[in-house]
Image: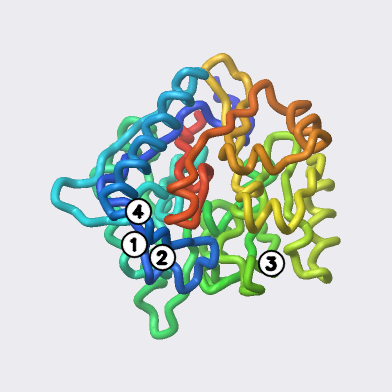
């Protein structure tokens, strides 16, 4: 009897996170990430210790809600400041593929790890590894930093991408060709008027809704973006420029637990920036809003909780 393919899902109950051992400010990354801040009142050791507490608390809270969290530690002896953000270098997909990406920040390329790729291919039934990092070594290098650059509607196979120095058209097209996605591209601007470094700091696509910092999107691109989201059945919940650029309110991720309940994960700072109406609308789409305190990671790393979570999707049969 011929098997009937299962429908694609937007959310997963299995995620992967990497415990940092040398978390700190990365000056190379800061050249294209205006969200990063230096905190001279803290020593490097204090920054690492606080980030580690924030990470372990986040993992514990996610597990307490019934999410399967796979954790890895940095390789012994390595000095990697940004490994806590694994979603930038790989993604997994229902199609049975694990994809690795070309990264603009050269110091971050050593985050790519064969042991993690091997684990994903075996334990998670991700049979094929598609390596896009060859775009880094072309005569004119181009970049696509995973689900930082890409915000995916996995059900309707749409890849939303704010074009920036870290998100280029050529590898974006290669991604879309690999998984038969359509790209919706636009321009968006960060706190100093620069092209926003990652799409996932200004938008999140859930199962039945999308959170969008529409104020940071180029005016001529807003209608195209809105039409694509509403056309695929999403309720668009807008956040302000200040919520986007100062509080990481766009950097959310919808996942689920083993009971199938939807959980919208965000940072405590993002949660506290939202007004009652926004929270009410988000609650109408999620059984749980999980607000995690990660102030040190956000300030020093320039990324929030969504950047810390790599979704793990098993191949659908």
Q: Circle 4 is placed at which residue position? A: 42
167 vs 118, nearest the viewer: 167
Q: How many marks?
A: 4
| CA distance separating discs 1 and 4 | 23 Å
Tell me the crowding category of disc 3: few under 14, some 14 to 19, or many 20 or more residues within 10 angstroms, Cα based.
many
Mark 4 or mark 3, which has the lower sequence index?
Answer: 4
Q: Badges 2 and 1: C-beta atoms under 8 Å apart?
A: yes
307 vs 129, nearest the viewer: 307
Q: Secondary structure at mark 1?
A: helix
Mark 2 or mark 1, which has the lower sequence index?
Answer: 2
104 above or below 306?
below
Mark 4 or mark 2, which has the lower sequence index?
Answer: 4
Q: Could you tell me which residue is drawn at 51 percent across and 26 percent down?
A: 13
Q: Circle 1 is placed at which residue position? A: 108
189 above or below 59?
below
162 above or below 179?
below
Q: Secondary structure at mark 2?
A: loop
Q: Badges 1 and 3: C-beta atoms under 8 Å apart?
A: no
Q: What is the number of the mark on residue 188? A: 3
> On the rendered image, what quadrant is the N terminus found in?
top right
Q: What is the number of the mark on residue 64? A: none
54 above or below 43?
above
Q: Circle 2 is placed at which residue position? A: 103
| CA distance separating discs 1 and 3 | 24 Å
Tell me the crowding category of disc 2: few under 14, some 14 to 19, or many 20 or more residues within 10 angstroms, Cα based.
many
* Image position, residue 164 (x, y; %): 58, 71
């Amino acid at each position: 009897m011929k098997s009937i393919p299962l429908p694609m899902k937007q959310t997963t109950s299995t995620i992967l996170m990497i415990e940092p051992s040398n978390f700190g400010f990365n000056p190379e990354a800061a050249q294209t990430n205006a969200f990063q801040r230096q905190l001279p009142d803290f020593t490097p050791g204090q920054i690492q210790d606080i980030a580690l507490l924030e990470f372990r608390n986040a993992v514990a809270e996610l597990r307490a809600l019934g999410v399967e969290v796979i954790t890895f530690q940095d390789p012994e002896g390595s000095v990697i400041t940004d490994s806590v953000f694994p979603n930038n270098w790989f993604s997994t997909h229902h199609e049975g593929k694990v994809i690795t990406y070309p990264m603009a920040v050269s110091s971050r390329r050593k985050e790519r790890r064969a042991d993690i790729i091997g684990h994903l291919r075996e334990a998670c039934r991700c049979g094929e590894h598609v390596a896009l990092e060859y775009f880094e070594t072309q005569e004119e290098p181009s970049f696509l930093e995973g689900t930082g650059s890409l915000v995916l509607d996995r059900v309707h196979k749409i890849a939303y991408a704010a074009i920036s120095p870290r998100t280029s058209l050529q590898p974006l097209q290669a991604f879309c060709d690999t998984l038969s996605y359509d790209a919706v591209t636009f321009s968006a601007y960060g706190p100093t008027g620069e092209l926003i470094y990652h799409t996932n700091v200004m938008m999140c696509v859930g199962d039945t809704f999308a959170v969008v910092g529409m104020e940071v999107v180029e005016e001529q691109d807003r209608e195209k973006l809105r039409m694509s989201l509403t056309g695929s059945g999403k309720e668009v919940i807008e956040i302000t420029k200040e919520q986007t650029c100062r509080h990481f309110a766009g950097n959310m991720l919808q996942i689920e637990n083993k009971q199938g309940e939807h959980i919208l994960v965000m940072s405590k700072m993002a949660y506290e920036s939202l007004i009652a109406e926004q929270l009410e609308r988000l609650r109408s789409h999620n059984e749980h809003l999980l607000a995690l305190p990660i102030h040190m990671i956000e300030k020093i790393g320039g990324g929030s909780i969504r950047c810390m979570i790599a979704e793990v999707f098993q191949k659908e049969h």
